[in-house]
Every structure is written in C-alpha cells, then in structure tokens.
Image: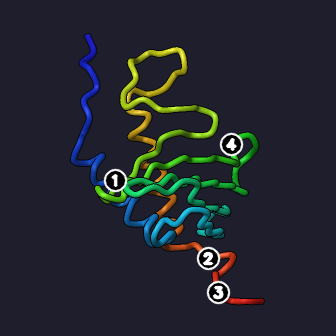
Amino acid sequence: MKSAYVHELREQGAVCEGNFLRLRRFLPGFDRDLERCFHVSAEPKIDADMELRVIERFRYTATVDITLQQHHMPEPFARVVFRVRVYLDANTSEVMTLERMGSLQGVYSYPNPQMYQADEKAQLNRWLAEWLRLLARHGTCRHVPGITD
C-alpha cells in the first residue's frame, strides 16, 4: 500500500518566501494596478514574455497575475497565467490558480479524475520560482516607468 503524501514544509516555505522576494524586486510595494512587462531570452531555446500585474491590494495581502507567453513552445502550451497570492505581513506568496486548472488544493489524492499529482500546488510554486529566477538573470524590462520615449 502506498503511503500518503507528506508536505515538505521547510522546502515549500523556502520556495514561497523566495518567490515573495523575487516578486517584490519586480513589483516594489505591490501597489494596485502596478504592471511590469519583461522579455526573457536564455540559451539554448528560452524565448518568453512575462507580464506581472497587481490586480488586488489590501493591507496584508496582494494578488498578482503573472502571464507567461512562451514563444519557444507549441500551442496550447505557450500561454500560462499564474494567479499568486502575496502575504505582505508574512513575506511569502503562493500560487492560487493556474489559468486552465482553477483553484488548487494543497494536496490531491492519487489517482484523481484531473490526473493531478499529489503535490501539484508545490510543483507549481517551484515552477514559478524557476521562471522568476530566469527573469532575474535573463529578463529585460519592456517599459521603464518614468522614462518618456
């Protein structure tokens, strides 16, 4: 009999805190309607655009939509939209939804009708971390606020 999935809380906490720090770097203050557009180009075949937009801002939380358009991927996999909840008082963040998946549970039983992995949400947080690291290393801003053309 297969044992139940157990969260790796330290690892998951570190990933979510790292995502918060990277997001804060790109969206300082998490002000409502703040938007940044970036292009990410890395060898050998990474070519993507990322749009980060704060859609909600409250005292202790903010909600950020991250749209990833991967030009190196075939349709329908090219466009992904992460909805991320940012906890400003706890300095952490987590992926709440992925565009085609809807709201995510912390753990899924396996097998399940959606064919999600038991740790689907943790995997999506790690995937977001990889993209934010790529953005930090290889991203260029499409528009710098305050500079007129």
Residue reaching furthest top? 1
Q: Secondary structure at mark 1?
A: helix
Q: Report, in whole angstroms, how far the alpha carbon at label 4 lies from the one at label 3.
A: 34 Å
- CB of mark 1 within 8 Å of CB of mark 4? no
User: Where does label 3 land, which residue?
Assistant: 146
- CB of mark 3 within 8 Å of CB of mark 2? no
Q: Which label was assigned to residue 140?
A: 2
Residue at 49% over, 49% down? 84
Where is residue 135? Give x, y as percent. 53, 67
Q: Report, in whole angstroms, how far the alpha carbon at label 1 lies from the one at label 4.
A: 24 Å
Residue at 42% over, 29% down? 105
Compare residues 99 and 41 and report the one nearer the observer. 99
Q: Residues within 10 Å of mark 2 (few under 14, many from 20)?
A: some
Where is residue 112? Give x, y as percent. 47, 16
User: Where does label 4 land, which residue?
Assistant: 77
Q: Nearer the viewer, mark 4 or mark 3?
A: 3
Q: Earlier in the sequence, mark 2 or mark 4?
A: 4
The three-letter amino acid code for the residue at tag 1 is Val
**Apparent side of residue 109 relative to residue 78 in the rendered image (left or right):** left
User: Where does label 1 land, which residue?
Assistant: 15
Q: Which label was assigned to residue 93?
A: none
Q: Splitting the image into 4 quarters, where does residue 38 fall?
A: bottom right
Compare residues 114 and 3 and report the one nearer the observer. 114
Q: Residues within 10 Å of mark 1 (few under 14, many from 20)?
A: many
Quadrant containing the N terminus in the rendered view = top left
